[in-house]
Amino acid sequence: MENAMGMYCFGIDVGGTSIKCGLFLTSGTLVDKWEIPTRLENNGSSILPDVAETIKNKINERGLTKENVDGVGIGIPGPVNDKGEVPMAVNLHWGFKAVASELSAITGLHAKAANDANIAALGEAWKGAAEGSKNVILVTLGTGVGGGIIVDGKIVSGHHGAGGEIGHAAVNHSELRPCNCGNHGCLEQYTSATGIVRVANDILEESTEDSKMRHVEKLSAKDVLDCYKEGDALAVRTMEKVGDVLGGALAMFACVTDPEAIVIGGGVSKAGKILTDCIQKYYKKYAFSSCKNTPIILASLGNDAGIYGAARMVIRD
């Protein structure tokens, strides 16, 4: 009989448009995954009840009981403190919410909550690119730059829930243009998809040299990376600058947590090894001697990283 006590757990990853859900064996096998829409009306008041409902339905559909389930972990796009409370989650239209205790109350299950980038890092450390690692830094390069830091197998959320917000590390103290957060010179301004395009445009403006990038109507990070792969001189200069900024920042973070691996995820990581090689070169240049050989690797779980990490949070070791 496979339904031994506490053999199952749920991993939930809440996004602005959909909620990813996974049913796992506590050994880490994904048994089933599905999505439900994120209902934002009435200040997102339906989100947790909808999650509770879909969990209840899945338990019934599988012929399980609550005794078979170890708990439910949930990832939220916003800061989450170690009590599982969210001061606010703008994309979900939430103000303060005690997510973990609310979800526990309506499901009758043990529940834990954490930031979505942090659970993605935990997922990659548990069953992804850094499988088996206890100390990991994950950087997601997308529209913005997210991060998740795992130390001794646990998420570092910090006092304000801002642990891992590495996209807002100040890497250029003379930057005049503001970041979306209001500060100036954040990592995100140079290494996100939008940041890469901005660095490219600055380089195109400063140079008279021809480049394939000049002939692209609306330059995207993918265009820059494609030109970089082809050896376009100004695209190479762009990515060397991006690699220098990101490699340097990662070298600083490595001084603090000394990870076994640094994992690169998000849309920009689709560029592959050419991107990690560029970052690794500068990381090595700036890193402290003990950390110089830390591998910089590509994330492997894709959009499932969040549900894996969410599930991992509630598994009792």
Image (spheres, helix red, strand yellow):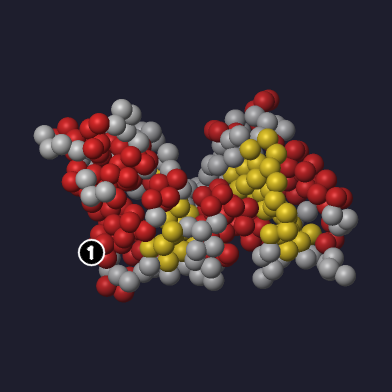
Give the residue at x 36% y 69%.
294
Give the residue at x 77% y 43%.
54
Q: Position of residue 27 (x, y in %)?
A: 69, 68
Seen from the viewer's position, the closer of residues 10 and 155 is: 10
Q: Is residue 160 above or below residue 180?
A: below
Q: Can residue 245 be seen in this view?
A: no
Rendering quarter of residue 214: top left
Q: In the rendered view, does 7 fall on the left or right side of 86?
A: right
Q: Mark 1 points at which residue?
A: 285
Residue furthest to the top in view is 42
Seen from the viewer's position, the closer of residues 233 and 133 is: 233
Give the number of callouts: 1
Q: Is residue 193 visible?
A: yes
Give the residue at x 71% y 65%.
26
Q: In the rendered view, does 289 fall on the left or right side of 125?
A: left
Q: Where is residue 72 in the image (x, y as percent from the top left)?
A: 71, 54
Rendering quarter of residue 311: bottom right
Give the residue at x 30% y 37%.
197
Q: Where is residue 32 in the image (x, y as percent from the top left)?
A: 73, 54
Locate the N terminus by quadrant. Answer: bottom right
Q: In the rendered view, does 56 fall on the left or right side of 228?
A: right
Locate the C terminus by quadrant. Answer: bottom right
Mark 1 element type: helix
Label 1 Cα crowd, 10 Å radius (few <14 / some 14-19 / many 20+): some
Q: Position of residue 187 (x, y in %)?
A: 33, 46
Mark 1: which amino acid?
Lys
Residue furthest to the left in view is 208
